[in-house]
Image (cartoon, rainbow, N blue to C red):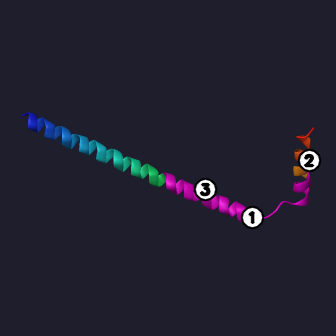
Amino acid sequence: MAELISAIGLVSAAAVTGIFSMIASKARKENNDQHDTAIQKLDDIQETVSEMSEWQKGHQQFHDNKGES
């Protein structure tokens, strides 16, 4: 009888572990999809913003000098 209980416990533990693994792998895949989307958006921004305009350079200089006071 003890062997039967041990076998049932072992099968139950394997089933719980398998279910947890399936859920974890799905969550990991969704997270990778979100990272890929974010990287694509950042690449698009990088292509759009190529350099600072003269106004932006002056404005940045204003903030840089403001910190020195």
Query: Along the polypeptide, which appears first: circle 2 or circle 3?
Result: 3
Residue 5 image position (x, y, % from top left): 13, 35
Query: What is the three-letter code of the residue carrying label 3?
Result: Ala
Query: What is the three-letter code of the residue carrying label 1?
Result: Thr
Residue 29 lies, with reference to residue 47, above or below; the image says: above
Q: Mark 1 falls on what kind of element?
A: helix
Label 1 and label 3: CA atoms lie apart by: 15 Å
Q: Residues within 10 Å of mark 3 (few under 14, many from 20)?
A: few
> Please, what is the dominant secondary structure of the magenta stretch?
helix
The image quadrant where one finds the C terminus is top right
Give the residue pinned by disc 1.
48
Give the residue pinned by disc 2.
62
Q: Mark 2 falls on what kind of element?
A: helix
Query: Along the polypeptide, which appears first: circle 1 or circle 3?
Result: 3
Q: Give the residues in magenta.
A: 31-58
Query: Along the polypeptide, which appears first: circle 1 or circle 2?
Result: 1
Query: What is the three-letter code of the residue carrying label 2?
Result: Phe
Residue occupying image coordinates x 51% and y 57%: 33
Label 2 and label 3: CA atoms lie apart by: 32 Å
Tag 1 near tag 3, CB within 8 Å: no
Nearest-to-viewer mark from 1 and 2:
2
Q: Mark 3 falls on what kind of element?
A: helix
Q: Residues within 10 Å of mark 2 (few under 14, many from 20)?
A: few
Residue 15 lies, with reference to residue 35, above or below; the image says: above
Nearest-to-viewer mark from 2 and 3:
2
Residue occupying image coordinates x 60% and y 56%: 38
Left/right placement of residue 35 relative to residue 20 reads right
Residue 54 lies, with reference to residue 62, above or below; the image says: below
Give the residue pinned by disc 3.
38
